[in-house]
Image (cartoon, coloured by chain):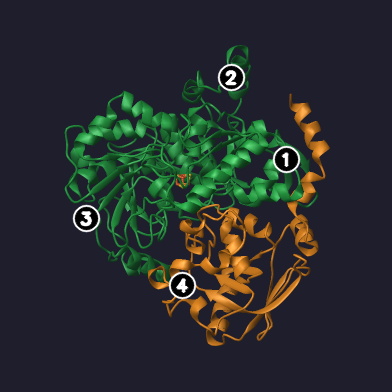
Chain colours: A orange, B green
Amino acid sequence: MSKAINIVTSTVVSLNSENVDTDQIIPARFLKATSRDGFGKNLFRDWRYENDNEQQPKKDFILNNPAYKGRILVAGKNFGCGSSREHAAWAIKDYGFDVVVSSFFADIFKNNSLNNFLLPVVVSDAFLKRIFDVVNTDPSATLTVNLEAQTITIDSTREQENFDINHYKKTCLLNGYDDIDYLLNMKSEIEAFENNRL
Amino acid sequence: MGKTLFDKIWEKHIVRQIDGGPSVFYIDKHFIHEVTSPQAFTGLNKRGIKVFRPRQVVATADHNVPTLNQHLPIREELSRLQVETLKKNCAEHGIELYGLGHPFQGIVHVIGPELGITQPGMTIVCGDSHTSTHGAFGAIAFGIGTSEVEMVLATQCLLQSKPKLMRINVEGPLNKGVLSKDIVLYILAKISASGATGYAVEFAGSAIRGLSMEARMTICNMSIEMGARCGMIAPDDTTFNYIKGRLFAPKGEDWDKKLAAWRQLTSDPDAVFDKEIHINAADIEPMITYGTNPGMGMGITARIPSLDEVADQEKMSFEKSLGYMGLQPGSALKGQKVDYVFIGSCTNSRIEDLRMVASFIKGKQKAKDVEVWIVPGSKQVEKQAREEGIDKIFEEAGFMLRQPGCSACLGMNEDKIPAGKYCISTSNRNFEGRQGPNARTFLASPLTAAVAAITGKVTDIREWL
Ligand code: SF4
């Protein structure tokens, strides 16, 4: 399976909270695994279930509302703050999201997402509000995220915004390349650097 | 134009600048622990490669270890497997491990400085956001995710974009009862939990210069709570005196050479920052948080904002947060009952913190209905506490001195605060569920936590000094 991302058109799951920290995305007690797989089922665990019990979903939480599903997660500002746990990005990706939209991402979370081919899209506060408004009235509304063109569009209203991403990262995502491949290819340059500092 | 402290270190670590992209950034020291490293080693093994510079990596087990009976096998199977996996990975790749039972074991951000591994001018990373702690020595230190842990293990490098630079100046003498924890909670309350996102922050000013290394670490530790990439403080004699003589500190001629270089590590007088903030130390009171992010803090005698004092777009999050905490908008916290007191974490578990708490509570008794856990940051802190007789003072007061680890800072092991209970904690995060499902956290300084242990309530330490 190719990891590359280019154009994603999908309905969205809208999480209208600010400062969603990585302890909410995946609570620490689920970090005991030694592999990268299967974190999706514990995504937002304590917001999703009463008493940590999968038989007792919290009705008012968006992931439990069958009207909202899709490959795009939209959330309030400062998403992914707190702990550096990459498990947060793994859980979101494993659950089935390919894009996260917010007006502001915490630094480490943003890097972690990019390293897992989960595209963080930063929009203006006003555009974010428009997305929430449109999706709240019509859960079947779709967004289109076009990485090549760096645009995000509310399909029903044709409202569109451009988003930033650095050129290097964009190339990686479009082609499914890892940072680590890039770095491994420059080992001798790194060794030369080390020798020069001595 | 002059250079900032950050610039000086940054420039020395650039291996290559990618056109229109990040820089290839060289890492001097890499700390790893059991929770965020296993998948990185799996990645290396899949690629069939070895750790590139094992001698620049130091490992410990801290996040998920029990804090009682550490000599026994870990009861919980998954936790045991994580700790054993770390052991196996370190052995396979030739990495020094200060694991359970080792005299140097402890919270990664406590042991690095205490062993003299953390030094000025270095670049330091760890798969833990509070790596910013090491910046107190005038290093660029920041937390990374597991994919990045893998990159550093494989190549000793990371791809990094240069952050913007901010300086926060705190000037003037500190008020009675105010510790460095209060300074950082005050800054957080002022600029919010995202106030420094995208910035590297240098803390400066006479109030910062006057702090001990332990106290400086507390501030840099929590710079991540403002969203900062890293926090740092220019090294000075306080720094050099702290490092000198420690196990891995430079010795002899090497020391003199390093010291001369370290003395250059300050922001030039004409250096320009993208943003500067000025704070008058006289405005800072003992602080406490009332909400579910570290930016939701206030002076201990203040009132929680009322609903009409909160901006419209923040009302929903604010109400949710207070609902979780079981608190009313507009109410005071002073006098609020607490059930648990946790003194520990990489923010405040060093020997200075323990000494301060001990000297305050000596001869006093904890309130009956409060449970008090003291969790030292490292084996060495624990040992020193015992040698100084601090353990006896805790025992007599009814406090429980446990063994080193992250413990109730993140509630990954058994040390969880029960649902609905209030815990006054010297750690760094009051997120929902951080200390256990539905646990409620008040962040405060070690002194404010200590006095709450005695009275059983949120108390103004100034009335006791
Ligand atoms: S004490 Fe808490 S914040 Fe510090 S390293 Fe451990 S879990 Fe992270």
In front of the other: A75 or A30 = A30
User: Do pointers 3 and 4 mark residues of a single chain?
Assistant: no
Residue A63 in view in this figure: yes
Front position among marks 1 and 3: 1
Quadrant into which the N terminus of chain B falls? top right
Front position among marks 1 and 4: 1
Q: Which residue is mark 2?
A: B250
Q: Is residue A57 above or below residue B43?
A: below
How far is the residue under mark 1 from the one under mark 4?
40 Å
The chain to which mark 1 is attached is B
How far is the residue under mark 2 from the one under mark 3?
49 Å
Label 1 amino acid?
A: Lys
What SS does tag 4 mark? helix
Q: Which mark is residue B50?
A: 1
Q: Is residue B348 above or below residue B295?
A: above
Mark 4 Cβ and ligand 1 under 8 Å apart: no
Q: Which mark is residue A48?
A: 4
Please provide percent x and percent y for residue B288: 32, 50
Label 2 amino acid?
A: Pro
Label 3 amino acid?
A: Lys
The chain to which mark 4 is attached is A
Of the image marks 1 and 3, the number of the one nearer the N terminus: 1
How far is the residue under mark 2 from the one under mark 4?
52 Å
Mark 1 Cβ and ligand 1 under 8 Å apart: no
